[in-house]
Amino acid sequence: MGLATTCALLIGFLGVGNESIIMVFLLSVLFTAVLTSSRGWAIGAALLSGMLFNFLFTEPRYSFFIYRTNDLMLIMFFLVTGIVSGTVTSRLQSEMKLASQNERTAKIMYRIASGFLSASGKESVVKKAEDLVREYAGLDCTVYLGQDAAKGFDIHSGSGTLGKLVLSDREPEGQQLLIVQAVCTQLGIALERETLVTDREKIRLAMVREQQRGTLLRSVAHDLRSPLTALSGAGNLLADNYKELSDSERRKLASDISEEIVWLTDLVENILNMTRISEQKIVLHKQDEVIDDVIGEAVKHTERLFRDRSFQVKLPEEVVTAPMDGKLISQVIVNLLENAVRHTPSESAITLTVKAEDKLMVSVADTGGGIPAVIRGHLFERFVTQDDEIVDGRRGLGLGLAICKAIVEAHGGEIFVADNAPTGSIFTFSLPMEESHERPADDTCY
């Protein structure tokens, strides 16, 4: 106002008329309204400007008397114009401030809502809620789920109250209260979403388990039928025609019966191992084993399969020991050798190789047709078979490699398959040469 008065006096000395001078005071009223955003200040500025104009620029000067009707009308119009302009300007300022505040609030609400989208798991969602309240409301808080806190903001969902959000310091006011309530609402929605995701995952797993159980039962029923039929036929033939059969024929029937029984034993052993793995009840009895003994046990168990095959075993020259459960590792080698025999032609050569480097590497190589690309990525999953053809009257359950992977990984090793140039496949698994200090040495349960 002082600046406006000074400018008006300078303009008055230059001989400018009162109609132009009073515009200077009108500008001061508008500036006051813009700077203060207050209707009261704008009206006060208009009244003060009218008094100053009357005192300084109307006749008689330096008094509040008005002799000329023209000056009186000028001051009256100025007051009306100043009050209306100041009121409108201050209202516009208030509307702009409110719009800006609403825009900021909308952005905060959007960030709160989108902040929960990236959080998964109840712990992450709860931590995200506490971080959002701290960031946007400046308040420390703690979320209690499923507990009856004495004071706090309820966290609701469609199924009821899930818990409370308790503030550690002062009570929220204004926008802080709005933010806290918004976080509670979004937290309830996010927790309900997590519950739905968990329930859906349980249903999916239950369906997968049911499907796998059905597949297992169908496969077991199919694979049991063939050897049992063979056992029954061989036994009946041996019993009914024992005297008529030659010694070589009786020996052949006895050998067939023995092979079928061994195959059934392996089948049952694989099913039991997979059951223990599925229920996480497989137990490792690890101790230092001589790898030659483990290999010898596996070869002895499968030697019947290599009577008409080219089979070679390559062992290290020195005696090598490694911590392992000898029985389970022998089962892994048996499964790999049986797979090599099952899925390769009779003229295919099979080689079992053991190398002792920084890790114990055991590989089974064949010169068959290789692994079809369609199942290569899922080869170590359950119920994955190389083809639908029935080999030697048996289809196979598709459990052998899955069991191998579970056993090897339980030992801290790896198993993988590679091409055996120019033809065939190499299945290799590795085992640590020393006991890991991250796991107990014996009786480890998986």
Image: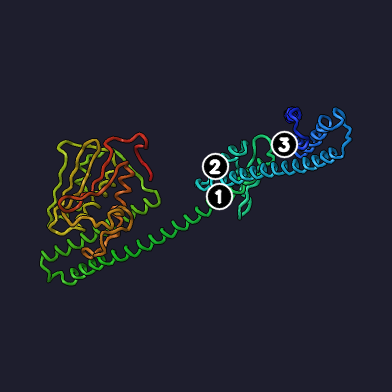
Q: Which residue was labeled with disc 1? A: 190
Q: Nearer the viewer, mark 2 or mark 3?
A: 3
Residue ID at (43%, 60%) = 207
Does the image show residue 325? Answer: yes
Locate the C terminus by quadrant: top left
Of labels 2 and 3, earlier in sequence is 3
Q: Are marks 2 and 1 in contact (CB under 8 Å)?
A: yes
Does the image show residue 307? Answer: no
Locate the N terminus by quadrant: top right
Q: Where residue 287 sits: x, y (%)? A: 29, 38
Of labels 2 and 1, earlier in sequence is 2
The extreme front residue here reads 15
Residue ID at (85%, 29%) = 61
Instruction: Determine the secondary structure under disc 2.
Output: helix
Residue ID at (78%, 35%) = 18
Which label sits on residue 27?
3
Of labels 3 and 1, earlier in sequence is 3
Q: Where residue 298 sits: x, y (%)? A: 21, 49
Q: Is residue 140 left or right of 218 when viewed as pictured? A: right
| Type of the residue with mark 1 | Ala
